[in-house]
Amino acid sequence: MDCAADAPPMSDSQRDDSPERDLSADCGPPRRSDAQPRLVPADADDGGNPGEDAPGQVAAEQVIEALLFSSDAALSAARLADLAGAVTPGGVRKHIAALNEKYESAGLSFRIAAIAGGYQMLTLPDFRPWVAKLNKQRAETRLSDAALETLSIIAYKQPIIRADVEAIRGVACGEVIARLRDMGLVRVLGRAEILGRPLLYGTTRKFLDVFGLADLDDLPPMEALRLEPRAESADEGDALPPAVAEPAPREYAVAGA
């Protein structure tokens, strides 16, 4: 829309005597020299509607909410005030109370709780069973360095017996393999047709799912892996066994296959 077209017509005398002015200055919202959002001070919320901030302004309540949402640890009121700026610790507490009222009225599953001398977003106790399931799944898929190293050997060398896994790693692996079996990442494929008929181990479908593999062919080639020997002990001058010492390759026949 052309704002100049809405201006009242001027007579010839007015046009000659009046100074020139830029009609575009009367059109549209005021221009801002900077594009950085500005924080609305806490005191400014008391005199107006916090939901109707001027363009480019961010309410202090929103900033506090964003900080708490992004933090995985409790933040004190003083810390929040320092991060947000233009708000006092007392104002932070008022904003947190207002946010909790909004969450409750909206029926949301979380609140801002006061813990450890600060504030943190937490889910309500009613949702503990589902959150516990999520945490359990995360714990089950968390692997130690020893477990990850053992799992890698089994993945590349399967079917493989425990003795060969231990020969490669240089340490006993019975407990680690048992843990991997409990996690559903390793399974028994059968027994090898050698003396003692030891168990043969291989990976499971869950292993492919956890590591995002379509099949075992998606594993990176062995040539791309660099296996470093373990460092020398600081107390003993003797070098420790290498992390991976490749044994002579062996082929196993699975009993009953």
Image: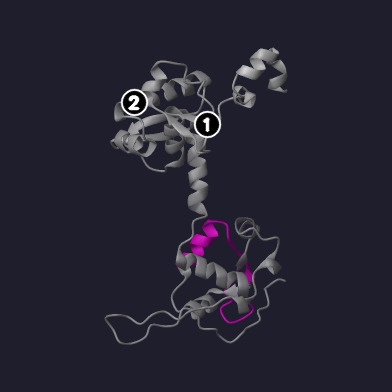
Q: Kindly identify which residue carries mark 2.
A: 91
Q: Is residue 183 left or right of residue 111?
A: right
Is residue 200 something one can see in this rendering? Answer: no
Please name the residue shown 69% across and 21% down the image.
4
Q: Nearer the viewer, residue 124 or 24?
A: 24
Q: Nearer the viewer, residue 28 or 204?
A: 28
Is residue 243 something one can see in this rendering? Answer: yes
Query: In the rendered image, which quarter is residue 160 located in?
Result: bottom right
The colour scheme used here is one colour
Q: Is residue 56 left or right of residue 14?
A: left
Please name the residue shown 39% across and 17% down the image.
46
Q: Which residues are magenta?
A: 175-201
Image position, residue 6 (x, y; %): 70, 16
Neighbor class of circle 2 (other Cα within 10 Å; few <14, some 14-19, many 20+) is some
Which image quarter is the N terminus in? top right
Q: Secondary structure at mark 1?
A: loop
